[in-house]
Amino acid sequence: MPLEQLWAGWRNAYVSETTDAERRGDDRDCVFCAIAASGAPSPDNGMVWRGDLTFAVLNAYPYASGHLLVLPLRHVSDLEELTGEESAELWVTTLAAVRAITVAYEPDGMNVGANLGRAAGAGIPRHLHFHVVPRWSGDTNFMTSIAGVRVIPETLAGAWDKLAKAWPAT
């Protein structure tokens, strides 16, 4: 039996809400661009490593201890906007992030991924970024679901110290 279709084009205004900054596609007020411009990696800016074209920074609202974001330095929102060099360094930096997390935390597994666009769950869709999240068996972090709270057993400065020490030499 074929599915019936109901035209609801009037709903487009609700499902395609974008901010002015997203429509502009620029880097004004971009938190990631501000971090990139904040200088060398340090516990103060949360940046763990910086390359020529990419950087790795702690997630300010981590899902788990050691949750890193890997980003291009240049303000781009889509994978297709990356140059070949940016794409290559982004992948190399993501692999280095996985290695650093593995050494620092010895997780049972790892989530690596990107939410491309607000509809896909990107909290900051204007600046492309990959999440690298260590996972442990049974680490459901149910508090986020129940109380809108995340329970993380260490400070961001503590996580920065562990990851900076564990970052592979280049």
Image (cartoon, rainbow, N blue to C red):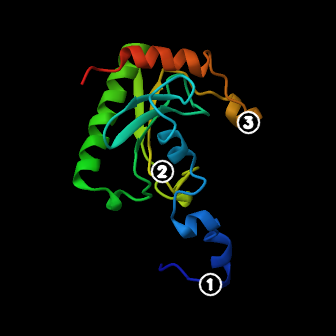
Q: Alpha-carbon neighbours of circle 2 within 10 Å: few (<14), some, or many (≥20)?
A: some
Give the amino acid type for the residue marked by disc 1 in the picture. Gly
**Relative side of 97 to 140, left or right:** left
- Determine which quarter of the picture holds residue 168: top left
Give the amino acid type for the residue marked by disc 3 in the picture. Gly
Q: Does residue 115 appear in this view?
A: yes
The residues tagged by marks 1 and 3 sit, at their Cα atoms, a distance apart of: 33 Å
Question: For the point 64% across and 69% down, which residue is it?
Answer: 17
Q: How many marks?
A: 3
Q: Are marks 2 and 1 in contact (CB under 8 Å)?
A: no
Q: Does residue 106 appear in this view?
A: no
Image mark for residue 9: 1
Query: N-terminal of the two: label 2 or label 3?
Result: 2
Residue 38 percent across, percent down from the top left: 52, 37
Image mark for residue 150: none
Residue 76 percent across, percent down from the top left: 42, 57
Q: Quadrant of the C terminus?
A: top left
Image mark for residue 115: 2
Q: Alpha-carbon neighbours of circle 3 within 10 Å: few (<14), some, or many (≥20)?
A: few
Of residue 141 and residue 158, the one placed in the foreground of this image is: 158
The residues tagged by marks 2 and 1 sit, at their Cα atoms, a distance apart of: 25 Å
Residue 45 higher or lower than 22, as above or below: above
Q: Identify the residue position indicated by label 3 in the image.
A: 148
Of residue 18 and residue 34, the one placed in the foreground of this image is: 34
SS under mark 3: loop
Of residue 50 and residue 15, the one placed in the foreground of this image is: 50
Of residue 3 and residue 133, the one placed in the foreground of this image is: 133
